[in-house]
Amino acid sequence: MMVIMNVDATKEQIEAVITRVEANKFRVIVNTGEDRTLIAVIGSNPSVLREQIMYMPGVDHTVPISRPYKVASREFIPENTVFPLDGFVIGGDEVVVIAGPCAVESRSQLLETAQAVKEAGAQALRGGAFKPRSSPYSFQGLGEEGLEILAEARELTGLPVFTEVMAPEMVPLVAKYADVLQIGARNMQNFALLHAAGECEKPILLKRGISALIEELLMAAEYILSHGNRRVILCERGVRTFETATRNTTDINAIPVLKNLTHLPVILDPSHSTGHADLVTPVARAGVAAGADGLIIEVHPNPKEALSDGGQSLSPEKFAVLVKQVRGIAREVGRK
């Protein structure tokens, strides 16, 4: 249920509603908009409070929130969530490009890639220090050493760092080095990790699970939002279907669907969704045309020698072409 306060509701009236809700063992999440305050009542069957609340001073009216996700819905927050990162804004008019290697393999590899993607037009650097792999024998990342190299790359280039966190106990360590914490597809429903991410002060990039419904992605985001961390970025990265021509099936539909359902920024990962370097640029173009707020692209100085996902990684030269092309698409759809 959502409580819509009067435009001229006082602070005391708002606090009285919150107190009444919490006294009945429900949680509240407050959205202070430009014109009025909205209070989401969270819990099992909150409509039982409707009669108590609707006639309280300062209350305009109450409405049910029809979606199972509350704070993530446009019913609760109609306007787009927009927030700054170093040097750019995500969720606004700008299409943000995040690029870098799948995994941090060495200092020289990462610093070379970071400089190349910055020169080509990337606004942020991605790179995995911890790598969840299908095989236990595959390269698993450099761990904290990789985080230190990412931090060094940020100092040298000014690019904010996106990197993955795999377990709740790792959140403080990764947050020490990274600007944005990524929760990968395999961990989308790692609920302990979602709780820990919600309590973290850093923005969270949440990837859609391999076979997850859009509603399940939004419910995962709700876990983070319910703890008060409102800086959540959703990422469509392809879903598993019967098709084997590509690594996954890119759900371009998900971008406009999510933009209609939620106020959260939505980006596309055409690298994981296709699994083939020659498909990354055309799918990136499609994502921007469909309304994506950004792209996250895998780039490696020598893809054939990459220790992880070389087949879907672009060379710096091909990445520069991608940036040029998506700039043209962005202008055509009224984005920067």
Image (cartoon, rainbow, N blue to C red):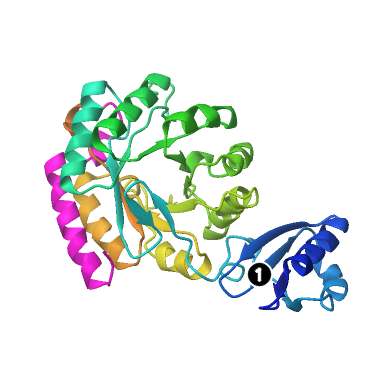
Q: At 42% from the left edge and 27% from the top edge, which residue is drawn?
A: 130
The residue type indicated by label 1 comes to Thr
Q: At 62% from the left edge and 65% from the top edge, which residue is drawn?
A: 32
Q: At 61% from the left edge and 37% from the top edge, which residue is drawn?
A: 196
Label total for image: 1
Left or right: 5 in relation to 299: right
Residue 261: image location, x then y, percent = 52, 68
Nearest the eye: 167 or 277: 167
Q: Is residue 32 magenta?
A: no
Q: At 80% from the left edge and 59% from the top edge, which residue is drawn?
A: 44
Over which residues does the magenta segment extend?
307-336
Left or right: 206 in relation to 33: left
Q: Quadrant of residue 93?
A: bottom left
Residue 18: image location, x then y, percent = 78, 61
User: Looking at the figure, which quarter contains the C terminus?
Assistant: bottom left
Which SS does the magenta portion mostly show? Answer: helix
Residue 46: image location, x then y, percent = 80, 65
Q: Is residue 325 magenta?
A: yes
Nearest the eye: 107 or 287: 107
Left or right: 143 in relation to 167: left
Q: Is residue 26 above or below residue 64?
A: above
Nearest the eye: 65 or 30: 30
Residue 143 shows in this picture: no
**Other residues around mark 1 within 10 Å, as few (<14) / some (14–19) / many (≥20):** many
Element at label 1: strand
Task: Name the residue that disc number 1 marks.
Answer: 37
Nearest the eye: 277 or 318: 318
Q: Is residue 110 above or below residue 221?
A: above
Q: Quadrant of residue 71?
A: bottom right
